[in-house]
Amino acid sequence: MDNTLAAGKRLLSVLVLAVLLSGCATAAQRQYQAMAAGNRAAGQEAYACVTAVYNAAEFAPLRAHVALPPDRPTLEQLSDGSLATDGEIRALLAVHPRVQACRQQALDHLTQSTPSFAAILATLYAKSEDNLIELIDKKESWGEYTRQTRDLAIEGRSDLTAEAERITSGLQQSHEAELAQRQAAA
């Protein structure tokens, strides 16, 4: 009877230890949670910032041409063969500093939470600027600008998804290694 009681106590101790070990977040889990929270906050702030610019009075002449979100333009926007007018160019130049501030804010936040995401976005922002210059210089129509902007948004989502998968895979491996070390130590 004493052996059964002792065995039961040992089994209970092992189960309690297993529950405690599994209940403690690994370093990889904590890192993932911090990254996810930072990325979520950065995304929400960036969306709010860009939406405020989009809804601003000085953006009004551009709304017919610019989709928000940029990966969901209308057929009219995609097929618009007109060049930017001088008034539209003035509007673009007027709102551009605010758009740049939104972008910089997003980059600053992502540099803290997920630096590789910030690098991807910085590259996309540079391509977007090149696209905007082509529109302002009247070398491309609004439809061409919209298609390139849509394509950049899709490319960005794809690049960020691939990077997120790479990061998650590495964190999963770290998590599993830490759990194995905990079990070996127990």
Image (cartoon, grey):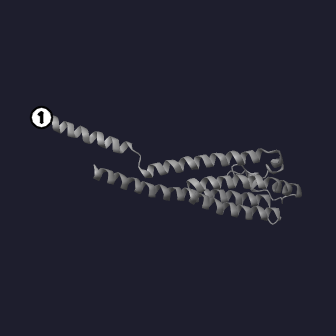
- Please count the marks in the image: 1
To which quarter of the image does residue 48 belong?
top right
Spot occupied by residue 117 in the image (x, y as percentages of width and height): 58, 57
The correct choice, above or below, for 12 with respect to 166 in the image is above
**Dot 1 amino acid type:** Asp
Q: In the image as oriented, which residue stretches furthest toward the top?
A: 1
Residue at horizontal 81 percent and vertical 59 percent from the top: 81
Quadrant where the N terminus sits is top left
Q: In the image as oriented, which residue stretches furthest toward the right?
A: 86
* Viewer-closest of 16 and 64: 16
* Residue identifier under label 1: 2
Q: In the image as oriented, which residue stretches furthest toward the left?
A: 1
Spot occupied by residue 143 in the image (x, y as percentages of width and height): 76, 58
Residue at horizontal 47 percent and vertical 55 percent from the top: 168
Residue at horizontal 63 percent and vertical 57 percent from the top: 154
Residue at horizontal 77 percent and vertical 55 percent from the top: 97
